[in-house]
Structure formats: structure tokens, C-alpha cells
Amino acid sequence: MSRGLFLTGTGTDIGKTYIAGLMLKKLHEGGKRAAYYKAAMSGNSRRPDGSLIPGDALFVKKMSGIAQPLARMCPYVYEQAVSPHLAARLEGRPVELKTVLQGYAALCSEYDFVTVEGSGGILCPIRMDEETIWLEDIIKALGLSCVIAAAAGLGTINSVVLTADYMKRRGLRVRGLIFDHFHPGDVMEEDNLKVCEKMTGLKTLATVKDGDTELDMDLAALCALYE
């Protein structure tokens, strides 16, 4: 039976995709049939034929070495570098939750572990027209537990604690924290991790340094996060 995990973050550009790539690489090199999925992806460039390239998915595919077809990684790909709900409105292709669920189910029928990456932070609107879909609606519809990705530097205490508190109040299951852009021995960053753990009650599952090519986490411990 396939197992899934949702990777969200404290905001945009804090390293979710990089962390996802390391997670997928760990699973793939450990002999697991691993897949990547992202419901909506904005800010993408075009191929010479005009088709859109799902940039985050391509990055994860290259970093991890997984053979999963790029076309099955993200059902909604947008060019505009704005929130998915606005990109969808500007480009005339709103996200349909049914389509997102179908794509995920198809991967679950073929792969052992499916890592789902969120768009932006937890309070990311995915659709806002005659229908409203927030990122948390997708997480709940998929029935997944979450890991919060965050940058290790200045300001992370505020963003991590607020994110974790919101998710818990909304009934989202959080398994732990992964910190990116971490500098071992940095007094402030080391303290940030301790304070975040104390304030949220969540454990730091791994830390990622710039340029890391391996996730500093045991394969069995990583697999145990997936449900």
C-alpha cells in the first residue's frame, strides 16, 4: 500500500523544493519506488514549442534521479509568478480538486512513497472565484500528515511557531520540522532550532546546509514519516 507525506513551508522560497529533492533522492537510492506531486505550480518558463515546464518538478526529478514522468508530477502548471489562485485566474485554468485527487491516486497505485509539496506557505490560496480552495483543503482531502520546512536564520521563530500553531488549530497533523540554509555552529541558528522545538513541541527531523546532496536523516526514520 502506498504511503504519502505533505511537505509545507513557512513561506515562499524557503527551500521546500530543495528539501523535497533530497527526500526523494534518499528514498530512491534506498530502493523505494518514490514519486513527487504538487497540485499547482506557478512561475514557470516555456519550452520552444510554447508548453510550460514545471520547474520545481524538473528540479526534484534531476536531483533525486527518479524515473517518474514529468507530466505526472503536477496537474496545474502556470506561467505567472504569483499565487496559484491568481495565476489560474489570469491564465483561465482554475484548479479542480477532483483532478488533483485523481492525479495523486494514480501515483499511489504505482509508487510506494508519494511526497506532496505545497505551494508557498500553509495559508496559500489555490482557487478563489466561485469556488474557494486553500492549501489546507488539499492536505485534508489527501488525508496526509505534514512536515514543515523552514529557513534556519533570523525570523524563523516567528514564522515556524505561527505556522505550526495555525496547522494544529486547523486539525492538520504535523510530524516535525526540517530547517534549510543551516550553518552548524552558528549560535543564533542553533538557538532558533531549540526555541522552535520548545514553542511548538515538534522535533527537528533534519537540517540542510546550502549545497547538501544528501538528507541527514536515516532512511527508516524518513519512511516512518509517511502514512
Image (cartoon, helix red, strand yellow):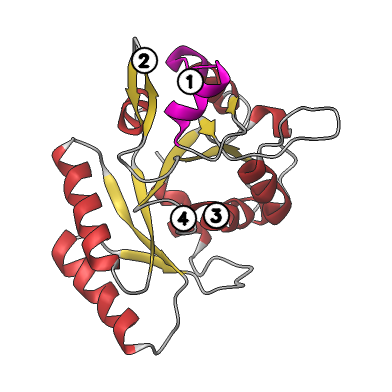
Q: Residue at x 18, y 59 (%)?
A: 200
Residue 59 location, x and y as percent?
Answer: 67, 50
| Magenta span of residues | 83-99
Between disc 4 and disc 2, whose residue precedes? 2
Residue named by callout 1: 89
Judged by depth in the image, the label closer to the viewer, 4 or 2, is 2
Residue 86 lies in the magenta-colored region: yes
- The residue labelled by disc 4 is 222
Which picture quadrant has residue 150? bottom left
Q: Are marks 4 and 2 in contact (CB under 8 Å)?
A: no
- Give coordinates of residue 13: x percent, y percent: 48, 55
Residue hosting label 2? 129
Going by the numbered disc 1, the residue's amino acid type is Arg
Is the Cβ of the residue at disc 1 closer than 8 Å to that at disc 4?
no
Residue type at numbered disc 3: Met
Q: Position of residue 179 (x, y in %)?
A: 40, 66
Gap between marks 1 and 3, in whole Å?
A: 32 Å
